[in-house]
Image (cartoon, helix red, strand yellow):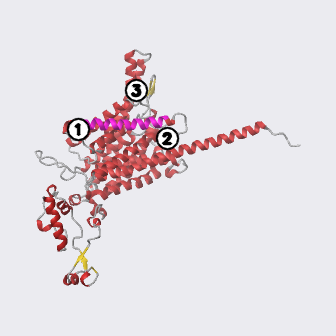
């Protein structure tokens, strides 16, 4: 006769197995969520690349693209080796308020989804600056500031604000006052940090040649980017990335209410960007009579930057406050930079510092429990409304203190670095290189090599015996002998003349418009040109 089954023990085993499977399932779901959001945020590097490449002149396109590429490469090494340890590594009780100092090179750490998510935030903070110093920055300067931001400045800021032991996160607790740093997705530690350094870098670097006239009576030269479609594409990619940037900051999807918070953050993000874009577009049209695309994209991004701080806990109607304020602050900061004659080609300071600061303030004003709610309770005479108002004002004051700390820390570290680089002549490229473009001199690669645009069908033309004898490259024999054309492609000026648009460019002498060396082909081209003129 078999021994009786202990049902209680079997049920306990089954319960333990279900708990283990449940824990593993939730852990995998959260890890997959973090990695998925991080991949989308990583794709924002492509958005920054397109945005910046389109906003610079074609002669500097390769230079700006390689900087965006190296942002990702430099940041991952620096954040893996040092940055993570400073941000979230454990340390002593007193020191831990300001910096972590363990888990260097991820020693003893294995939560790789969390690390990867924080890394892409670090790369975002570093890449902001490249737009402010575009078309004139020495490559060694770029490598230096990118390394310092990703391995030192940004990690310590995140320890202050996002580590449970950081002094900003702990805040002040006294009586009815309980303040903590409120920045859900990085309006301050990411964008205000990057925007502040952008201002300093652009100021140290000086304006691009021809941007601001020496004679105050002359008008400023408008230095235009070479591709509006590139800039627009980059803007759309960044808008897409911001949805993951803010929604993914929930950091989990397995708890009750996580999905609701993710959706709320995404809705508030796109609403804030939309209100910022529309208010800026309306003001610009009222002043200039033009529906601007490029500046509207920047205004939209500033609204999304501002939404980062409180997108998880404000009602959608609050996006009117956040978005409109961000759009107007972007406008004001952009105009301020021009008035100060500080050249910021991408408006990095106005978008990220302006939007980031406004976001930190807005999260303490319009979010639940913020100043707007406290004032409403105080006016209506609600119970304990005075205490609520005191708490809301204290929280707003703490946000201001933290914002000032972020700016001071960022500038204090980068000021001596930029100063030293300027003193040793490594901050900015020479005048000759800047005028002729950084692509060829610094990288040996043109973004748009003219000879790469030939279609190949007319690269060879018929030749007589003398031409065939003197030519190094020939095809065929006898009457079918062909030689390589001297000018197998059209220049920009020649192409414009064919389409009768030469009035938009510097006119060329008639003799220089040699599109074809074959007489018959030249005659046909001239006939087409004459017909277009008629």
On screen, residue 484 versus residue 183, left or right, reads left
Residue 370 tag number: 3
* The one of 5 and 525 positioned closer to us in this rendering: 525
> Which sits earlier in the primary sequence, circle 1 or circle 3?
1
Main SS of the magenta part reads: helix
* The one of 59 and 420 positioned closer to us in this rendering: 59
The residue to which callout 2 is attached is: 251
Q: CA distance from mark 1 to mark 2?
A: 38 Å
**Residue 499: horizontal and vertical position, in percent?**
19, 59
Determine crowd level at label 2: few under 14, some 14-19, many 20+ residues with C-alpha closer than 10 A: some
Q: Is residue 225 above or below residue 280?
A: below
Residue 284 tag number: 1
> Which sits earlier in the primary sequence, circle 1 or circle 2?
2
> Which stretch is magenta?
260-284
**Residue 391: horizontal and vertical position, in percent?**
41, 24
Q: Secondary structure at mark 3?
A: loop
Q: Residue at x 21, y 73 (%)?
A: 486
On screen, residue 524 versus residue 167, left or right, reads left
- Most extreme residue toward the right is 1
For the C terminus, the image quarter is: bottom left
Which image quadrant for residue 281?
A: top left
> Which sits earlier in the primary sequence, circle 3 or circle 2?
2
Q: Residue at x 62, y 41 (%)?
A: 22
**Residue 162: horizontal and vertical position, in percent?**
45, 39
């Amino acid at each position: 006769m078999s021994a009786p089954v202990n049902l209680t023990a079997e049920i306990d085993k089954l319960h333990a197995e279900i708990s283990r499977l449940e824990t593993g399932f939730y852990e995998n779901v959260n890890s997959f969520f973090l990695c998925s959001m991080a991949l989308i945020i990583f794709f924002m590097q492509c958005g920054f690349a397109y945005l910046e490449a389109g906003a610079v002149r074609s002669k500097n396109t390769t230079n700006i693209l390689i900087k965006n590429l190296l942002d990702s490469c430099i940041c991952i090494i620096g954040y893996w080796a040092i940055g993570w340890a400073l941000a979230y590594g454990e340390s002593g009780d007193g020191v831990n308020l300001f910096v972590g100092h363990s888990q260097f090179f991820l020693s003893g750490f294995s939560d790789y989804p969390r690390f990867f998510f924080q890394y892409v935030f670090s790369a975002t903070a570093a890449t902001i600056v490249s737009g402010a110093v575009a078309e004139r920055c020495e490559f060694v300067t770029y490598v230096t500031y990118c390394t310092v931001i990703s391995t030192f400045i940004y990690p310590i800021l995140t320890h202050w604000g996002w580590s449970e032991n950081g002094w900003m996160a702990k805040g002040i607790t006294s009586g009815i006052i309980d303040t903590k740093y409120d920045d859900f997705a990085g309006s301050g530690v990411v964008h205000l940090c990057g925007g502040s350094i952008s201002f300093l870098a652009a100021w140290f670097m000086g304006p691009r040649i021809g941007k601001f006239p020496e004679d105050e009576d002359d008008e400023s030269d408008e230095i235009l980017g070479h591709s509006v479609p590139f800039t627009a594409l980059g803007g759309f990619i960044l808008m897409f990335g911001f949805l993951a940037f803010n929604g993914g900051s929930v950091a989990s999807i397995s708890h009750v209410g996580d999905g609701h918070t993710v959706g709320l953050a995404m809705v508030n993000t796109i609403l804030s960007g939309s209100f910022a874009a529309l208010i800026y577009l309306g003001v610009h049209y009222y002043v200039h009579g033009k529906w601007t695309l490029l500046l509207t994209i920047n205004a939209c991004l500033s609204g999304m930057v501002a939404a980062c701080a409180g997108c998880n806990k404000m009602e959608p109607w609050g996006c009117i406050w956040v978005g409109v304020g961000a759009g107007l602050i972007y406008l004001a900061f952009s105009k301020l930079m021009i008035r100060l004659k500080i050249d910021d080609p991408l408006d990095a300071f106005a978008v990220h510092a302006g939007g980031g600061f406004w976001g930190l303030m807005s999260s303490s004003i319009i979010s639940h429990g913020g100043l707007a709610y406290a004032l409403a309770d105080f006016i209506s005479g609600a119970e304990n409304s005075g205490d609520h108002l005191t708490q809301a004002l204290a929280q707003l004051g703490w946000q201001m203190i933290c914002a000032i700390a972020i700016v001071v820390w960022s500038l204090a570290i980068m000021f001596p670095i930029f100063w030293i680089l300027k003193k040793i002549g490594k901050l900015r490229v020479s005048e000759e290189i800047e005028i002729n473009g950084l692509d060829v001199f610094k990288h040996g690669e043109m973004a748009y090599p003219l000879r790469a645009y030939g279609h190949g069908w007319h690269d060879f033309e018929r030749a007589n015996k003398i031409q065939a004898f003197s030519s190094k490259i020939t095809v065929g024999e006898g009457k079918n002998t062909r030689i390589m054309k001297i000018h197998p492609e059209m220049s920009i000026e020649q192409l414009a003349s064919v389409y009768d648009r030469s009035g938009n460019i510097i006119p060329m002498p008639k003799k220089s418009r040699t599109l074809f060396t074959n007489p018959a082909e030249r005659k046909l081209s001239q006939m087409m040109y004459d017909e277009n003129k008629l």
